[in-house]
Image: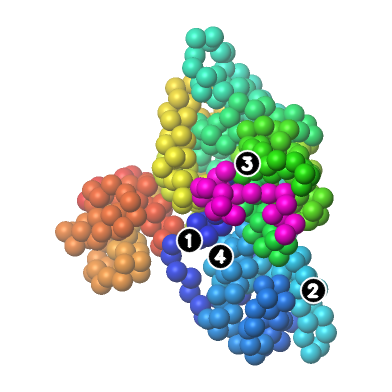
Amino acid sequence: MRQPTAAERVVSRPPRFGRFDFFDNESTGPWRGEISRISPDYVGWVQSSLNRILGLRLAVDGIAGSATRSAIRTFQRRNGLAADGVLGPMTEQALMRTGAGNPTSASGTLAPSTLPAPAAGSAVGYLKDLPELQTITLAPASPVAKSSGWPGTRLTLVDIYNRLGGLMGAVARKTQVEVAAVLAVWKVESGPYAHVPGKAVIRFENHLFYRLWGTANESAYAQYFRHGGYRGQSGNSWENHKFREEPSQAFRDFHGKQEGEYQALRTAIRLAGENSALQCISIGGPQILGSHYALIGYRSPREMYDAFQAGERAHVLGFFDYCQHNKQVRGGLLPFLRAGDFRSFARYYNGSGQVDFYSGKIQEAYDLARQLPLTAGETATNALAWGQEWETEVSRTSPDYVRWVQSSLNRILGLRLAIDGIAGSATRSAIRTFQSRNGLTTDGIVGPVTEAALVAAGAGPRPSGGGSYVP
C-alpha cells in the first residue's frame, strides 16, 4: 500500500502519556520480559539508544519526559512506525535492529521482546496461521464469465475474483466484510497485475528508505536515490522517485516498471542490507509495506517477503491480518470496510495525504464490483468468527444504545449530556458536531459510518441487539 509519509499516518487523536501508556501500545498481549519496562534502567537504555542512533543529547536520567517521547516519535517516523511516542515491542525491536543492542538492567540483560504468538483460533491470532485456511481453494467454485465489451476496470475485478474469490469469500464471511470491498482495494493497489511466484508485484519507496537508512548514510543515499523534496527534486516525498544502479549513470524513473522496482530493491540491498531494504517495499495484491511484517505475524521482513513471493494465499490472509491488527485506530480497519466508509479506510491504509484520490478510486471499483454476479460471500452477513462469535447487529433504537452514544460523545467531545437513553435535541446536536469534526454527513443520525467513527475515536464497546437508530 502506498503511504505518503509515516508522519501522515499518525492518528489525529493525541496520545495519552501516563505511567503505563508510555510503554503499553504496539501489542496484542503481554510482552514484558525479565525486567520492568517502566523502570529507570529501561528508560535509561531507551535514552542512550536514541542518543546513539539519532545523534541526540538526551539526559540519560531514566525519566520518560517530553524530550524522550519526542525523540521516540522521531525514531518511529524514520522507521515507518506509528509515531505515537509509545515504546512497545515493535519500536523496541526497531531500536535493536538499528544498533541499540539488548536492553540491560542492574540484574542483567533482557532478551529481545517479541510480539505474542497466540494459539490458533484465539481472538488476537493471525489468520495466516490457521490450518483450516490453508486448504480453502483460492478460486471461487463459480467463476464469473467475462464479456469482451466490458471496461478494463470491470475485467480486472473479474480476473481478481476468479483467482482469489474462494479464499476472499471465506474470510469475508467470517469478518463481515463484502467481497466487493476487498476486490476494490485489490484493484486500486495492484491493478491488473497477476501474481507470478517469485516475482510478486512490489513498489520500492525511496522516501521510506531515506528515512530508515539514508539519513544516517547521506552521501551513499545521494549517489543512488532521489525523491520529492530531496536535493532539489520537486514534489512531495512520495513522488518523483528516481534511482541509478551506478554513480556513473543518469538517474531514471522506475515506478510502474517491475523490472525497475526490483533493480531499485537490489541496489538498496547492496547498500543497506536485506533487513532495511525489504522494509521499504510494498508487496503483493494488497501492497503491504515490509515494515509491517510483525503486525501481520512474521518474524522478519525476509519471512514476510518469502511468503508473499510464494503465493497469493499469504496476500489475502495478510490483508485481513493487517486490517484487524492495525492499531492506528481503535478496532482496526475492518469496521470502515464493513460500513463502506472508504474515506476513513484510505486515510489509515494509504495515508492522509491522498485520501480523496484513493477513496475515490476504491469507491469507483467497489460500485463496479457490486454489479458482478459474485457467489463467494458477497453480502458477508454471516456473523461467525474464529475463536469467538461476532457481535450481533446492534439495536440503534434501544435506550442502552442511545446511552452508549451519549456517554461516548461526552468522552470524545468533553460534553455533559444526560445519560438518559433519550435521543433528544441535545444528543442530536452533539452527534452533528461529532460528524462535522470527522468529515461525515452532519444529519444527526448514528448509522454504521458514524458508529465506526465513534469507535475509532475512542468510544467503548457498544451494546448488542437488532434494528436501526434514527433519532
Tell me the distance, in whole angstroms, between the alpha carbons under discs 2 and 3: 31 Å
Q: Earlier in the sequence, mark 1 or mark 3?
A: 1
Q: CA distance from mark 4 to mark 2?
A: 22 Å
**SS of the residue under disc 1:** loop
Nearer to me, 341 or 270? 270
- Mark 4 lies on a secondary structure that is loop
**First of labels 2, 3 by sequence position:** 2
Residue 287: which numbered mark, if any? 3
| Percent coordinates x, y for residue 434 in the rendering | 30, 58
Q: Earlier in the sequence, mark 2 or mark 1?
A: 1
Residue type at mark 3: give it.
Gln
| Crowd around label 1: few <14 · some 14–19 · many ≥20 (10 Å) | some
Disc sitting over residue 11 in the figure:
1
Q: Mark 4 or mark 3, which is nearer the start of the sequence?
A: 4
The residue under label 2 is 101
The boundaries of the magenta stretch are 219-240
Q: Position of residue 409 (x, y in %)?
A: 31, 64
Residue wearing tag 4: 83
Q: Are marks 2 and 1 in contact (CB under 8 Å)?
A: no
From what the image shows, is residue 251 above or below residue 464?
above
